[in-house]
């Protein structure tokens, strides 16, 4: 950056992206992408969520992001789903096929895929 005007231009450009992240009405899918998650196969899970959400033309309503360690390495890949006004749902031992099913049944259909949740995997 060379000037304050350049910084203001960057801020204006990024404002929409930051606003999207702060949108409490948006559904968020967060994939654990720490070393343990990646080693367990989180990359294809992240890609499957992005692809399925995009294919369903839901990218404006569902944000797919990644995070570091979620803290449950034995259950990796771990995915957390946040829907406005509802409790967080934690999916464990995910793979690409499970991710597609979660998009279809939970994110689009509104029904949690209970057999993939942490509550049913303990």
Image: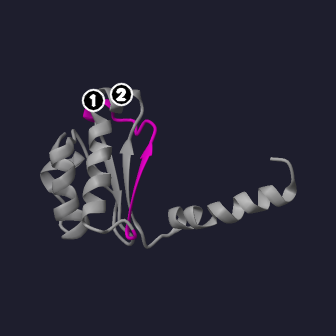
Say whether residue 12 is magenta.
no
The span from disc 1 to disc 2 (Cα, nearest Å) is 6 Å
- Nearer to us in this view, 62 or 120: 62
Query: According to the image, label 1 marks what residue?
Result: 40
Residue 18, x across and y down, in percent: 58, 62
Name of the residue lying farthest toward the right:
3
| Residue 39 on image: x %, y % | 31, 26
- 112, 34: nearer the viewer: 34
Relative to 73, residue 3 above or below = below
Image: magenta residue range: 60-76
Q: Quadrant of residue 102?
A: bottom left
Quickly name the residue at label 2: 36
Q: Position of residue 71 (x, y in %)?
A: 39, 36
Q: Quadrant of residue 14?
A: bottom right
Q: Residue furthest left?
A: 115
For the C terminus, the quadrant is top left
- Identify which residue is drawn at 17% across, 48% down: 98
**Residue 80, image x and y in percent?**
34, 51
């Amino acid at each position: 950056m060379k000037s304050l005007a350049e910084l203001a231009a960057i801020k204006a450009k990024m404002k929409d992206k930051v606003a999207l992240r702060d949108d409490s009405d948006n559904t968020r899918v967060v994939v654990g992408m720490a070393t343990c998650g990646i080693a367990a196969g989180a990359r294809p899970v992240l890609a499957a969520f992005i692809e399925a959400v995009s294919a369903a033309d839901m990218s404006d309503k569902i944000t797919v992001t990644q995070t570091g360690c979620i803290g449950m390495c034995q259950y990796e890949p771990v995915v957390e789903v946040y829907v406005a006004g509802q409790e967080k749902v934690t999916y464990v031992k995910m793979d690409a096929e499970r991710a597609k099913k979660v998009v279809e049944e939970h994110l689009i259909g509104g029904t949690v895929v209970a057999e993939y949740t942490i509550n049913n995997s303990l």
